[in-house]
Image (cartoon, rainbow, N blue to C red):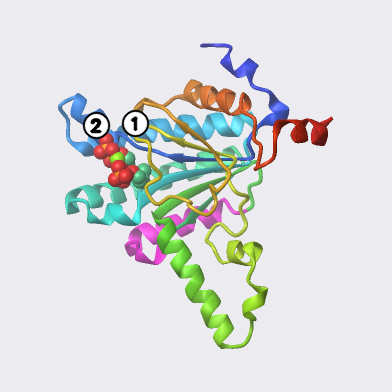
Amino acid sequence: MTNLIDKIEKSKLPKHIAIIMDGNGRWAKQRQQERVFGHENGVVAVKETVEAAAELGIKYLTLYAFSTENWNRPKEEVDALMSLLVKTINQETKTLNDNNIRLTAIGDLQSLEKETYDELMTAINETSNNSKMTLILALSYSSKWEITNAMKMIAEKIKNNEIQPDQINQELISSYLTTSNIPDPEMLIRTSGEYRISNFLLWQIAYSELYFTPKLWPDFRKEDLYLAILDYQSRERRFGLISEQLNNLFN
Ligand code: IPE
Ligand code: IPE
Ligand code: MG
């Protein structure tokens, strides 16, 4: 395992990796513990992954931390997740600055409790000048919420005559999503052996390479990220073309 990192081709790194961090509850259950214990241990995996991605030179890392649908979980779990979030953001701001990592967030941030929102904004402001990597937390995020929201904003502009319907194109739609300044992820990873997207970045992953691993999120380590990237690098991304066309393009 030690030299996995050396097999990674540095010139062919994805610029943006998005991760659905799943399996915390099952990890805790396997240990006869409460689900919150799994979330707490998930933080270890977050730190490892952020560190590994920054060391490799990944420019954008998006972590799905809490979905719109997750609000419907039992109140104790939601409360515990939010406190863990505040605590972790608070503790990690210095490390983010030491490593030149900028924090940002996507999602319906207005729906967060004031304390969570304030803590998040403080960390975002304090890291805003960092440039090595952008860490994007998807919080109270769902893709259908995001697209609906974008449609409302575009409709409002049309109503006010600021946009004409024939000006609507893919770039314009992208610019109204919460990811407007972020390139689409080349790769999406989901842990815990589930093969679904769970309302994450539906528009943005149109051509992403999907990678699924049975590892539960709290067990995810640097080597697991390296394995995912190696798998990505072994694929041929055709974007609707045929192999021969790609060879012509790049030779
Ligand atoms: C992912 O782990 C973390 C969040 C969704 C917040 P889960 O809590 O979904 O864990 P499982 O899927 O129940 O094992
Ligand atoms: C997706 O995980 C959301 C996050 C990882 C934050 P879930 O555990 O909520 O997804 P489902 O319910 O299994 O689809
Ligand atoms: Mg889950």
Tag 1, which secondary structure? Answer: loop
Left or right: 136 as drawn, with respect to 139: right
Three-letter code, disc 2: Arg
The segment highlighted magenta reads: 109-128
Tell whether label 1 touches label 2 (CB within 8 Å). Answer: yes
C-alpha separation, residue under disc 2 versus residue under disc 1: 9 Å
Ligand 3's image quarter is: top left
Can you tell me whether the CB of the residue at mark 2 lies under 8 Å from the nearest atom of ligand 1? yes
Identify residue for label 1: 192
Residue 85 x %, y % = 35, 47
Does residue 16 appear anywhere in the picture? yes
Vertical arrangement, residue 162 with respect to residue 59, above or below: below
Which of the two residues, 131 or 209, is positioned nearer the viewer here?
209
Can you tell me whether the CB of the residue at mark 1 lies under 8 Å from the nearest atom of ligand 1? yes
Identify residue for label 2: 26
Which of the two residues, 92 or 165, is positioned nearer the viewer here?
165
Vertical arrangement, residue 102 with respect to residue 174, above or below: above
Vertical arrangement, residue 166 with respect to residue 40, above or below: below
